[in-house]
Amino acid sequence: MNRKSFTIPNRRDMELHAIHYLSEKESLFPKKEISCLVIFCHGFTGDKYEWGRFTKTAEKLSEIGIDSLLFDFSGSGENEREYVTLTKQCHDLKDVYNWAINKNYIRIGFIGLSFGGLTVLGTDIPDIKTIIFWAPAFSIRKLFNPKVQESLKKTDLKLPSSGGQEPIMINHSFIEDLSNYDVDELVKKFSLPTLIIQGTRDRSVRLEDTRRFFKQMPQDDKHKLIEVPKATHNFDGEQLDQFIAETISWLKEYLCD
């Protein structure tokens, strides 16, 4: 496995720090000249490592011939600080996807964790083979009660970020921007192969909300919800292993078939 750190310029001429995992093994895809790539989308206040969960998954994918791209959204991780919004992240994701297309990747899938899952949902990208949501924060607006929303109109908010990086910055534009996305409608139109994995003890993303959104998706073999017993929003250890195992099984069927 080769691992390369670099930056990807976005449409606003800002550099997004990224890591490209290149597998040295033959891809599962029968045509050797076509490589499979998974793009990882981190959560709110997170980064491209996600406390080692993304790196471990990328390493496991490399073992079966799937390349990975981990990156920091604008205003997060190693990137220059600016106010975070969903729209900025959707634009970042589209720019990262275009980078992958320019690298001749044809079979591309996404893993979206928490707010990264909402970002994937809100980004209009053609020709994606499959998406895997890890504890998707489709209802993140519920975390900001009226008191907090009113406070954001007067004062910016700085939130601790992963890995000891500089705090994440948001202001009231974060809330206003969320209102531009009708999650229920986006979910109903989600026809491509979709796997959702979530822990039964997740207190940040309510399992009841995830179940409700899942029921709005097409109910067929290409849409699946897996509930991991005892896993919280910060799942690790055996629970992380189960997330990874289910992810790999799904990718074998829908990304590298």
Image (cartoon, rainbow, N blue to C red):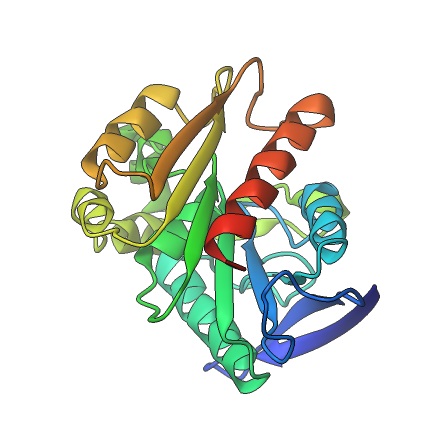
Please state if 138 lies on the left or on the right of 52 as rendered.
left
Identify the residue shown where x is 39% and y is 30%: 225
Identify the residue shown where x is 56% and y is 35%: 246
- Which quarter of the figure has residue 37? bottom right
- List the single residue furthest toward the front: 30
Percent of width and height locating residue 1: 83, 63
In this rendered view, identify the residue nearer to me: 130 or 6: 130
Percent of width and height locating residue 10: 51, 79
Identify the residue shown where x is 63% and y is 41%: 160
- Which quarter of the figure has residue 244? top right
In this rendered view, identify the residue nearer to me: 69 or 247: 247
Q: Is residue 153 shown to the viewer in this render?
A: yes
Is 195 drawn above or below residue 107 in the view shown? Answer: above
Is 126 drawn above or below residue 234 in the view shown? Answer: below
In this rendered view, identify the residue nearer to me: 76 or 59: 59
Q: Is residue 155 shown to the viewer in this render?
A: no
Is 1 drawn above or below residue 101 in the view shown? Answer: above
Please state if 212 lies on the left or on the right of 70 as rendered.
left
- Which quarter of the figure has residue 19? bottom right
Percent of width and height locating residue 185: 16, 48
The total of numbered circles placed on residues is: 0
Identify the residue shown where x is 65% and y is 75%: 32
Percent of width and height locating residue 115: 45, 45
In this rendered view, identify the residue nearer to me: 103 or 46: 103
Please state if 17 lies on the left or on the right of 155 as rendered.
right
Please state if 38 lies on the left or on the right of 91 as rendered.
right
